[in-house]
Amino acid sequence: MSHRPNILFLCTDQQRWNSLTCYGAIGAHTPNLDRLAAQGARFDNCYVQNPICGPSRASLFTGMYARHHGEWANGVALPQDRKMFTRSLADVGYDCGMVGKQHLAACDSWQTEPRRDDGYRVWEWSHGKNHRSVQNAYHTWLRQHYPEVYTRTFPEKGGNQNTHIAIQSRTGTPIDEVPPECHYTHWVAERAIDFIDTPRDTPFCLVANFFDPHHPFGVPKAYRDKIDASKIPPPIGGIAELDEKPSPHRRYSETSYGSKAVGFQNYSAAEIAEIRAIYYAMIMFIDDEVGRILAALDASGQADNTLVIFTSDHGEMLGDHAQLMKGPMMYDVAVHVPLLMRWPARIPAQSIVPNPVQWVDLSATCLDVAGAAPMDQQQGASLIPLATGTAQGWRDWAICEYRDSGVPEDPPIHTTMLRHADWKLILWHGAPATARDTEGELYHLATDPDELENLYDHPAHKGKRREMKRKLLDVLAETDMRAAQRHHLV
């Protein structure tokens, strides 16, 4: 067996950090992920670089901050000269595969995401459950194994059966509620298990991407029936707090997805409670399938020599602060994600890491354990020293940047977040970046962890606001891209 570990990267879509019981979620059921956390390290403050899928995933694969890698919004392709960490792993002998959603380019309606120089031997791409591309590997599997379910769910060239149905639907669509054995979540696990069980003489890296708990909010009945909605706390905050928040917050409460979807204010309290229950049921389903994957890893005899990473590309508002889904908002429920890492050979069990870490650190971590050289463009740092308790001088901040990254707005919306120690600053940029007014948010997370009281315009906190803006300027300078080597002094 190679001394270099396998890498099993499990990623969900739109899962807020506090949706697992190991992070304190009430009403959730996640025993397998809780066990994964107990067997390794739980990172309590992991932040993504953008609250939208495509730009966030580009930061993961390139190790670059959002303003540098080029995929600044959904619908924008990652430039071809941006190297992926999976390519680097393949170059040092790893057998690499990807199952599920990748989202490094536009994937609208029937369009297929173009293949990159990604290093994958196995490429089982599926942008989503409703995506109608002929190259959707999930649909191919569904047609082969459950043809009657596929035919019933997707009438031939059914007009609105495309990715937009996920935005327009108030609750689940037919493909979200098929029997568990036919579901996308189960398919990801099936393909992951097959990859793990493949005989090989080299270490592997598998990126297994679940689509859930992304909206629309639907799940097989067998899982919805296992969640008690009455045990799930109601949303935090409400419409009254919008008076103290930047003006776009109110419109994102009235409508979602830049007016493309129904907003929080169009749902009753009972409907919001049901959405929250379905969300937890989707996560319970994922937990069961992660359990199957980890059991297969154990059975293969490779668990002790495998780094398992579980995380998500961004969060979900889920009714908190009178908002649903995602957008330019930088609340912790939108940009703070779960991160669990298990590597029995190196990471002590029951480890808890309080330091702020970022998604740009994950590619650096994978290259580190593989003994591969850092990518020239890499801006993150390996998390192994933090997980093993040997880190020194770790950063005390995290940054997240939104540049009209979701549904396009007129005028554009640009926001930047800085988390520094117990404080959080969010700038809603104005001229010259956009014709909108400059606005802001400032939260003291030690006394207001739910981000209910915006201190940005409070006279008593004027000094802290100024201090955080100065710190943001310093962080922006620190995160500039200076990868090119200087060969001469003049």
Image (cartoon, rainbow, N blue to C red):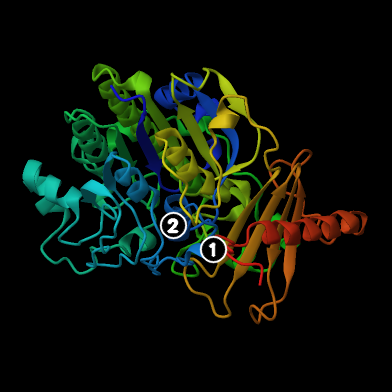
Compared with residue 340, is residue 84 higher up or lower down, i.e. above or below?
Answer: below
Helix, strand or loop under label 1: loop
Q: Residues within 10 Å of mark 1 (few under 14, many from 20)?
A: few
Given this view, does label 2 or label 1 mark the residue nearer the observer? Answer: 1
Where is residue 2 shown, x and y percent of the image? 31, 25
Residue at coordinates 29% horizontally, 58% vertically from top-left? 117
Mark before the other along the chain sequence, 2 or 1: 2
Residue on which the image places disc 2:
58
Which quadrant: the N terminus?
top left
Tell me, yes or no, if residue 2 can be seen here. Answer: yes
Tell me where residue 29 sits by quadrant.
top left
Q: Residue furthest right?
A: 460
Callout 2 secondary element: helix
Please state if 431 lies on the left or on the right of 227 as rendered: right
Is residue 25 visible in the rendered image? The answer is no
Q: CA distance from mark 2 to mark 1?
A: 20 Å
Residue 151, given in percent of the width and then of the height, sits at 10, 53
Residue type at numbered disc 1: Ala
Give, as a three-letter code, the residue at label 2.
Ala
Q: Depth check: give the residue in front, 488 or 409.
A: 488
